[in-house]
Amino acid sequence: MRIKMHNMHQSVNSINARGAFASHMHMMHDLCMNLKHIRAARKMSQRELAALAGVDQSTIQRAETMHHTAKLDTYKLCAQVLGVTLEDIFAEDRDVAEIALVRAYRNADERGRRLLMKLAEEAAALPPEHDE
């Protein structure tokens, strides 16, 4: 295994490796921006979220920018205060409305879930609106 890893490292162009790492880190940063979007959707400032979570505003700022010192406990506290899950904070491409729909579905009883599914199917079947 060591030999394979060593050969792999030798074959990777250092410029491409840095670019790939930067790209990955940019993607991870964008994922964490969900925390900022969720907080903003709740019309809450960093200072307000920090007070409710029992941390400093700078701790929230580091979490939102995915600073290397940000801790998982901070994300857990923020999720609890904001009424979302860690999955919501780190989700790739869900906006606030999608998060609300998922939460409504998870919290609904069987009848409510059937109704939500029916509404989703009807909404998906609607023709697109055209601005005139």
Image (cartoon, rainbow, N blue to C red):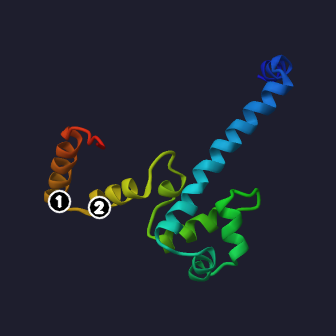
Q: At 70% from the left edge and 43% from the top edge, which residue is drawn?
A: 25
Q: Name the amino acid, label 1.
A: Gly
Residue 113, percent across and down? 20, 55
Residue 72, percent across and down? 63, 61
Q: Is residue 47 above or below residue 92?
A: below
Task: Write down the residue under mark 2.
Answer: 104
CA distance separating discs 1 and 2 = 9 Å
Task: Write down the residue under mark 1.
Answer: 112
Mark 2, residues whose alpha carbon is within 10 Å: few (<14), some, or many (≥20)? Answer: some
Q: Quadrant of residue 125?
A: top left
Q: At 44% from the left edge and 70% from the top edge, which residue is drawn?
A: 83
- Asked if one can make out residue 112 in the rendered structure from this viewpoint, the answer is yes
Work out which residue is located at the far front of the displayed protein and give it: 132
| Image marks 1 and 2: residues in contact by CB distance under 8 Å | yes
Mark 1, residues whose alpha carbon is within 10 Å: few (<14), some, or many (≥20)? Answer: some
Q: Secondary structure at mark 1?
A: helix
Residue 73, percent across and down? 63, 67
* Of the image marks 1 and 2, the number of the one nearer the N terminus: 2
